[in-house]
Amino acid sequence: MEEKTRILLCEDDESLGMLLREYLQAKGYEAELCSDGEAGYREFQKTPFDICVLDVMMPKKDGFSLARDIKQLNPATPIVFLTAKVLKEDVFEGFKLGADDYITKPFSMEELTLRIEAIMRRVRSKRQTEMETVRMGTFSYNAKKQLLSQDGGETKKLITKESELLGLLCQHANEVLQRDFALKTIWVDDNYFNARSMDVYITKLRKLLKPDPNVEIINVHGKGYKLVVPTPGEKKEDESTEEA
């Protein structure tokens, strides 16, 4: 059974927000409604979402500020802005922040769902293409088969959690993967025991990747992990590491 798309909906107009949430739920989405930007950020920190629909003008934290914070936690999260503003400068600001779409009020709810569906189709297609086989230096990783292979070396069959964690690191290659985001995405709950389990899997993945000195999982103090891989034609730059 296909999992429902999870939407973070931030709208300070109570009537509109509730109407949108009910409509999205009726269309088969899971929608979490927040009435201000700070509440939206707290909700995003607690649980992973597939896409965020953010009103621009909100109390406590506006939609642009919230989008910046969300992108710091997970740069791959698609974002749609809802706004009554029609100034080009505001539209440009939204897209500079990495927005996937920008809908001007008033709009039809059918239009919103069609745009969400179009974005999610692009995201799923990109993820599937990227994750079929990923190159990491001399390694190849096939997420579907959970196989990690090295050129001229052996192929390892990863267990599910190892594979999911490596897949998430690959999606954020050369970027910081937030520790809390990884825990909630893979383990759902970020309790002490799950955190220790993730540390164990990180250690195992480091050992598996050790044969290639240009591929490395480093700790980013106070934030999470970074899978450092060479880009085509380049070697990994020296970076200071801090083991857990």
Image (spheres, grey):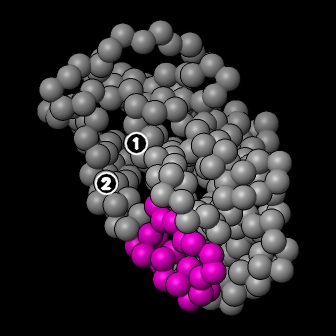
Asked if residue 168 can be seen in this view, the reply is no
Image: 204 above or below 13: above
Q: In the figure, residue 232 lies in which quadrant? A: top left
Note whether residue 33 is visible: yes
Q: Nearer the viewer, residue 139 or 96?
A: 96
- Residue drawn at point x = 57 percent, y = 22 percent: 220
- Does residue 140 sit above or below 132 in this rendering? above
Q: On the rendered structure, is 156 left or right of 180? A: left
Q: Which residues are magenta?
A: 98-121
Instruction: Say which residue label 1 marks.
Output: 170
Q: Work out which residue is located at the far front of the displayed protein and give it.
A: 87
Instruction: Looking at the picture, tell me which residue is in the foreground, 93 or 5.
Output: 93
Q: Which residue is mark 2?
A: 130
State yes or no: discs 2 and 1 in contact (Cβ < 8 Å): yes
Tell me the amino acid under the disc marked 2: Glu
Residue at 33% from the left image edge and 25% from the top image edge: 215
The quarter of the rendered structure image containing the C terminus is: top right
Task: Give the x, y percent position of residue 225.
Answer: 54, 29
Question: Which amino acid, by three-letter code, is at mark 1?
Answer: Cys
Q: Which mark is first along the chain, 1 or 2?
A: 2
Query: Where does the image place residue 51, in percent across and percent down from the top left?
Result: 57, 63
Quadrant holding the N terminus: bottom right
Binning the other alpha carbons within 10 Å of mark 2 as few (below 14), some (14 to 19) or many (20 upward) gives some
Q: Residues within 10 Å of mark 1 (few under 14, many from 20)?
A: many
